[in-house]
Amino acid sequence: MFTYSIRKLLVLIPMLLVISFLIYGGLELMPGDAVSFIAGPEAMANMSPEKLDALREALGLNKPFLIRYLNWLGGVLRGNFGYSLTSGTPIAQIVKAKLAATLELSFAALCISSFLGCLLGIFSALRKGSFADTILTVAGMLGLSIPEFFFGLCSLLFFAINNSIFPIGGRLTAGNGTVTDRLYHLILPALVMGLAMSAGVMRYARSSMLDSINKDYIKTARSKGLPEWRVNLIHGFRTALTPIIVLIGFRLPTLIGGSVVIEQVFQWPGVGSEFIAAVRGQNYPLVMMIALLSVTAVLLASFLVDLLTAILDPRVRLN
């Protein structure tokens, strides 16, 4: 187990380097630069080429692409993530302030989607062909087809604007940072995000459970006279849980970067909103840091999923 873990972790290093290089290269292909965003079109038109070059030189934008990438990479390895090109604020400070809000929303949505998705998926599999199974299947297809932003806007309109059950947006009320107030603001965006995700988990759990309960060892367990609940939960669900964990394990890191839509709709002050602003302003250091954070989370999730799969399923061997 230890040798396998070290080998998997070492493989992540070249993958991170390659992906970071590709992201940096993609940003290089974007038209314009941070100077055009900072100065604005009118100032750019009235500014002399010498002043523009001096501003680019001050921001380090005149250096060759490879030199800038290596300088950025060296700074990251030393723990120096640089400064925002638009505000001058240390990037570590920006990410630290925004990451907590995104993790809070993502974790709540992941818990909701995992619980509801697994519960409804298993119920649908055990009631295959029934009216309840049909309703849940249709609901799952609708959940997958409805865009998150549309679902979020409809929820915001009904529960916040028209009926004032939940706040319109934000993470907390100004001057009130209590736990109750934070939960009050978290409920609606977390439910919208979680319910949108639970449709996929439910369909995956149903398919996995149906495959599991038709195996020979399930028939053997029934022939021994074991109670049906024990056969389904202990023998069937444990095997069905392995592919579900793989799906859920990859959901959390993608939520960190994929919560952009919900954060925009509910004015949630997280990493997603900051990432959109950084891309629009071509704030390369901040974009790279958020992208690197998301990629690292995905790769670490892949590593943890491999370990959990091996622990849960004794048929998997750590080679």
Image (cartoon, rainbow, N blue to C red):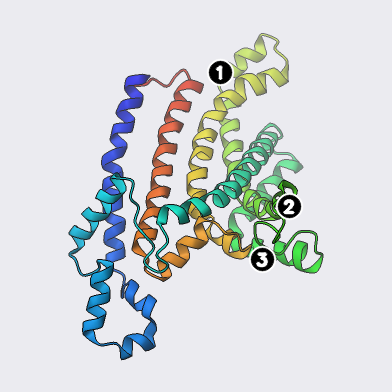
Which residue shows up at 55% across the image and 48% down it?
Answer: 100
> Which is nearer the N-term, disc 1 or disc 2?
2
What x and y, as percent, mark residue 253? 48, 45
Residue bearing the label numbered 1? 216
Q: Which residue lies most toward the top here?
A: 224
* Residue at (71% x, 46% y) in the render: 179
Image quadrant in which the N terminus is located = top left
Whether residue 37 is situated above or below residue 14 in the rendered picture: below
Q: Secondary structure at mark 2?
A: helix
Label 1 – label 2 distance at C-alpha: 52 Å
N-terminal-most mark, 1 or 3? 3
The amino acid type, in three-letter code, at marker 1 is: Asp
The C terminus - image quarter: top left
Front-most of 45 and 240? 45
Residue name at image x 48 percent, y 48 percent = 254
User: Looking at the image, is mark 1 or mark 3 nearer the viewer?
Assistant: 3
Residue type at the position of mark 3 = Leu
Q: Is residue 78 left or right of residue 302?
A: left
Residue 226 visible in the current orientation = yes
- Indicate the position of residue 29 as horizontal and vertical percent values: 27, 68
Numbered badge on residue 153: 3
**Up-down relation of residue 314 to residue 69 (above or below):** above
**Residue 230 in picture, x, y percent from top left:** 69, 18
| Amino acid of disc 2 | Asp
- Of residue 307 and residue 133, the one placed in the foreground of this image is 307
Q: Secondary structure at mark 1?
A: helix
Residue 89 falls in image quadrant: bottom left
Residue 123, which numbered label? none
Q: Which residue is mark 2?
A: 181
Where does residue 67 sit, x and y in percent of width and height? 18, 58
